[in-house]
Amino acid sequence: MDYTIREMRTEEYPLLDDFLYQAIYQPDTTNLAPKSIINKPELQVYIKDFGKQKDDYCFCAEVDNRVVGAVWVRNINGYGNVDNDTVEFAISVFDEYQKMGIGTALMNKMLEHLKELNYQKASLAVQKENYAVRMYRKIGFEIIDENEQEYIMIHRLGN
């Protein structure tokens, strides 16, 4: 599968609504939450006014001129928050493009970008049953905390 990883353009930021919904781990595909779930305040922190904060960065994956995946970070009080200096990851790839290396490529691109900008670490939260846990560990994230449902993971970027 040929794909391109590039910075997401400002006019494409509304696509983050779809990617945020896609990022919600829903193991029971026969009983999906309504898309309106992304309007909850605890989810809106990931996308509301994206691009207006200094720590907002987003890359996307494109296949045949269609954006099929996105990774974005911002400094928020989200599910994976560890402190006030650490940006938190969000990532999703549309179902039909998963398990092709696109998610890993997106994550690596963002990690490289954050290293270039001298960030010391980045965090994320992931449901324990989510198959992506293996990918996050493989690219260098480590579990630093957990609750009943999720792992809180960080990637140390500093030299």
Image: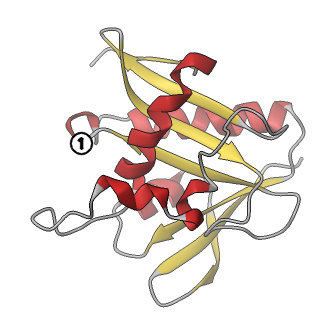
Q: Nearer the viewer, residue 47 or 60?
A: 47
Residue furthest to the top in view is: 65
User: Can residue 105 be seen?
Assistant: no
Residue at x 58%, y 67% (from the top left corner): 42
Q: Is residue 79 above or below residue 99?
A: below
Left or right: 90 as drawn, with respect to 26? right
- Residue 19 falls in image quadrant: top left
Q: Is residue 66 above or below residue 122?
A: above
Residue at x 88%, y 58% (from the top left corner): 85
Residue at x 52%, y 56% (from the top left corner): 136
Residue 98 pos. (x, y %)? 28, 40
Q: Is residue 23 above or below residue 116?
A: below
Left or right: 33 as drawn, with respect to 69? left
- Residue 154 falls in image quadrant: bottom right
Left or right: 146 as drawn, with respect to 91? right
Left or right: 124 as drawn, with respect to 62? right
For mark 1, what is the residue? 95
Q: What number of labels is visible? A: 1
User: Can residue 132 be seen?
Assistant: yes
Amino acid type at circle 1 is Asp
Which quadrant, please, contains the N terminus? Answer: top left
Q: At numbered mark 1, what does the secondary structure look like: helix, strand or loop?
A: helix
Q: Is residue 148 above or below residue 43?
A: below
- Circle 1 crowding by C-alpha within 10 Å: few under 14, some 14–19, many from 20: few
Residue at x 58%, y 64% (from the top left corner): 41
Residue furthest to the left in view is: 30
Q: Nearer the viewer, residue 90 or 102?
A: 90
Residue 94 pos. (x, y %)? 30, 38
The scheme the figure's colours follow is secondary structure
Residue 43 pos. (x, y %)? 54, 60
